């Protein structure tokens, strides 16, 4: 079969799906609607299948279109990654770099890393797949992200986990609370305080297992889905959050104080997730190095 298909055709097809119709896709891609429609028709003829059901009111994707979408999205991602990797040949890097990242890290740690990275590569755009650890594995395994940043405890046969940081747990509390005056806090000092924990991570399991030997039972007063929601609760004086160090805001918060917890020191291992048989672009490798260095700086800051 002789299939004539250009990268623009793939972008048009995906834009129609992503933006809900031909008109909006044409606007986003700076094409006239007749040109866009004609290219879709030529693509359908080349593939020998109808990709969209069109009416005056709506556009829907056919079954064949859904099958094609999976492959076209992979091709589009690989093309974007190729543009990024052109830096290997001395070309100024540009394009889209897609990574998966644990939600808690994407909310506080990652933005500071990207600010540093974009000072070096201002033309790189980012697609951040912030998700749970398990969903992040899916993004990397399916090729929807070049690599991921996640915690140890989840695995897939086709992926490899490379640790780069052991992240200590800490207490986030209001700065005017008496306990905030301490430089270090023992777990037994907070066992009767109202605590906040995220139920979308494995943090609760790690903490409970680590404290079981000491016979400590914590007062989990608030269970939330997203750790970022804890800051509003803390600011109102409703509770204190137990969180990993990298999950905190890295700027000085006017109200909230972060204090490392010890006796025992409880940590989770953070690392990179990559597909075993997929080579990263040079820019992705440099982003990994930036992440690793920034994490190490935080470790020194909290000694």
Image (cartoon, rainbow, N blue to C red):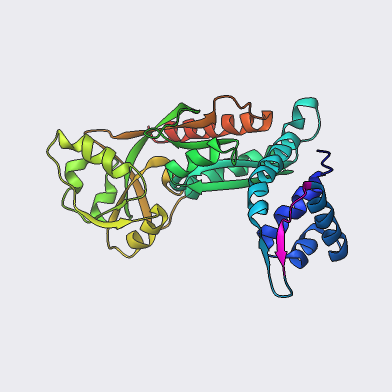
- Residue 112: percent from left, percent from top: 55, 44
As drawn, the residue found furthest toward the left would be: 215
Q: Is residue 73 in view from this perspective?
A: yes
Give 260 or 149, whichever is nearer the viewer: 149
Q: Is residue 169 above or below residue 67?
A: above
Name the quarter where the N terminus is drawn.
Answer: top right
Q: What stretch is highlighted in magenta?
A: 47-54
Give 209 or 276, whichever is nearer the viewer: 276
Q: How many labels does the image show?
A: 0
For residue 212, which quarter of the picture?
A: top left
Tell me which residue sits at (46%, 48%) in the image: 103
- Residue 241: percent from left, percent from top: 31, 52
For residue 223, which quarter of the picture?
A: bottom left
Give 68 or 260, whichever is nearer the viewer: 68
- Residue 192: percent from left, percent from top: 16, 52
> Is residue 78 found left or right of 131 in the rendered image?
right
> Is residue 69 found left or right of 189 in the rendered image?
right
């Amino acid at each position: 079969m002789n299939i004539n298909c250009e990268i623009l055709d793939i972008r048009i097809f995906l834009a129609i799906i992503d933006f809900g119709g031909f008109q909006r896709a044409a606007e986003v891609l700076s094409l006239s609607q007749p040109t866009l429609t004609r290219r879709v028709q030529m693509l359908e003829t080349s593939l020998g299948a109808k990709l969209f059901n069109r009416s005056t009111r709506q556009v829907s994707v056919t079954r064949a279109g859904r099958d094609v979408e999976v492959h076209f999205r992979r091709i589009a991602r690989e093309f974007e990654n190729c543009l990024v990797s052109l830096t290997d040949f001395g070309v100024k890097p540009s394009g889209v770099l897609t990574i998966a990242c644990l939600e808690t890290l994407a909310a506080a740690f990652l933005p500071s890393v990207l600010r540093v990275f974009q000072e070096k590569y201002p033309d790189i755009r980012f697609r951040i797949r912030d998700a749970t650890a398990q969903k992040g594995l899916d993004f990397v395994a399916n090729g929807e992200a070049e690599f991921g940043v996640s915690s140890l405890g989840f695995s897939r046969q086709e992926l490899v986990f490379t640790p780069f940081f052991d992240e200590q747990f800490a207490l986030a509390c209001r700065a005017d609370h008496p306990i905030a005056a301490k430089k270090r806090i023992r777990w037994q000092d907070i066992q009767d305080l109202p605590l906040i924990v995220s139920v979308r991570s494995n943090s609760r399991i790690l903490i409970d297992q680590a404290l079981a030997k000491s016979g400590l039972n914590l007062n989990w007063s608030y269970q939330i889905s997203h750790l970022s929601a804890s800051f509003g609760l803390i600011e109102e004086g409703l509770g204190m959050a137990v969180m990993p160090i990298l999950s905190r805001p890295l700027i000085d918060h006017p109200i909230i104080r972060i204090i490392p917890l010890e006796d025992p020191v409880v940590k989770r291992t953070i690392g990179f997730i990559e597909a075993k048989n997929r080579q990263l672009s040079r820019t992705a490798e440099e982003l990994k190095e930036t992440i690793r260095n920034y994490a190490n700086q935080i470790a020194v800051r909290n000694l």
